[in-house]
Image (tube, grey):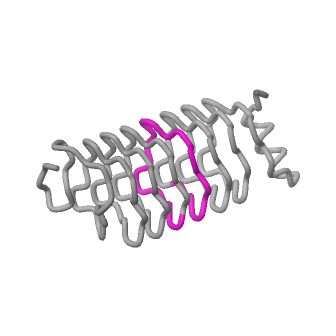
Amino acid sequence: MEKVTTEDLLRYYAEGRRNFENVDISDAYLFEANLTKINLSGSNLTRTHLPYANLSQGTLKMADLSAAELGDVQLYQVNLEGACLRTANLRRANLRFANLQGADLSEANLQNADLYGANLKNAIFKRADLSRSNLQNADLTGANLSGANLFRAQQANLTATQTDSSTIYPDGHTGS
């Protein structure tokens, strides 16, 4: 996996390059970066700092975003299928119509995130914080919500999801 510096990534992107598959940009500082339609599939973005960045319509399939700082990020229509977002901060993130099928969001912070119309099939949300998130028209079929906090989540259709006794439902109650 090729290591790419923050400066090189931004320079190549500004020159018109969009394909950055299988690169290592871990620990990069990309605050407010505009990287729409970028392809970072299979890339290492662990601990990357991306608050207020725009990666809308990008492709990040199978990317590793563990412990990434993604607060207030724009991920509209982004493809994160099979991505690892364990312990990532996605507070207030725009994930409208995003594809997170099979993604691992265990222990991620998704407070107030907008997941309207998102594909969340078979996603893993173990011990994730989805409180006050917008789940209207999101497809949660097969999603694992064990230990997840869904307190005051909006329009969550929890039929066909996996929950356990520690899952906190939108109305505040716990139980299977």
Picture coordinates of residue 92, whole percent (x, y): 41, 57
- Residue at the spot 39% in from the left edge and 54% down from the top edge: 142
Does 156 appear above or below 71?
below
On the image, which quarter does residue 42 sit in? top right
Asked whether, in this view, residue 162 is left or right of residue 12, the answer is left
Q: Is residue 74 magenta?
A: yes
Residue 116, placed above or below residue 65: below
Task: Identify the residue shown where x is 54% and y is 32%.
Answer: 47
Asked whether 121 or 9 is in front, the reply is: 121
Q: Position of residue 48 (x, y in %)?
A: 58, 36
| x then y, percent, for residue 163 | 25, 48
Which residue is nearer to you in this view: 14 or 18? 18
Residue 40 colored magenta? no
Quadrant of the frame with the N terminus: top right
| Left or right of residue 43: residue 102 | left
Magenta segment boundaries in residue numbering: 73-97
Furthest residue in direction right, as rendered: 15
In the image, residue 58 sits, relative to residue 21, either above or below, namely below
Q: Is residue 100 above or below residue 116?
A: above
Tell me what residue is drawn at x 30 percent, y 40 percent.
127
Q: How many marks?
A: 0
Q: Where is residue 94 shown, x and y percent of the image?
A: 49, 61
Left of 131 or right of it: where is 143?
right
Assign the magenta stretch its main secondary structure: loop
